[in-house]
Image (cartoon, rainbow, N blue to C red):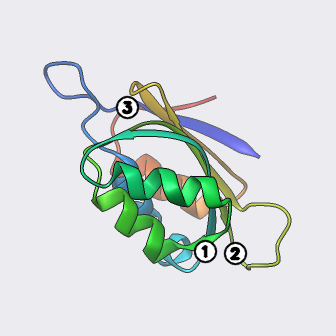
Amino acid sequence: MKQLTIADKTADGVLSFDLRDIIRCLGAPAMESYWEIGQVECLGAGADAFYKQARQAARLSGRSLLRLADHVDQVIDGEFRGYRNVADREPWVIVRAVDSSAYDIESDDDAALNMLRRRFKEVADI
């Protein structure tokens, strides 16, 4: 899979985006995917719901993942694997939150990677 990292920051040096922005940028393919959550750490009112879903280790819809992401202030760490079909064994995209400093994305979907490159400013291939 191809990899890129996104590290757009505000003037005071904090990330200017979060998981919800990446999911929205990926659009319909992300919303129609089934997601696994791993090793998530986050802050905000919805953090407990996020942790509960991660512990269940069950795939959830893209809309459900976006709802979780919309109810936290920040995803600090975590791995989010998107599958096109519920029975797929290999993800089409992997999104990793890296210690509040960047998001790394892996995918063989060039259109998805190009959407991210167009939406964000500080993007580099890994």
Kindly identify which residue carries mark 3.
Answer: 122
For mark 3, give the secondary structure. loop
Q: Tell me if residue 43 comes above or below residue 56 in the rendering.
A: above
In this rendering, the label closer to the viewer, 3 or 2: 2
Specify which label sits upstream in the sequence, 3 or 2: 2
- Quarter holding residue 59: bottom right
Q: Residue furthest top?
A: 12
Mark pair 1, 3: CA separation: 26 Å
Query: Which amino acid lies under the numbered mark 1 shown in the image of this protein?
Result: Ser
How far across and down, in percent of the image, does residue 77 sit?
A: 49, 34
Q: Report which residue position mark 1 lands on.
A: 33
**Looking at the image, residue 34 lies above or below residue 49:** below
Q: Quadrant of residue 91?
A: bottom right
Seen at 58% across and 37% down, the residue is 4
Q: Quadrant of the C terminus?
A: top right
Crowding near pointer 2: few (<14 within 10 Å), some, many (20+)?
some
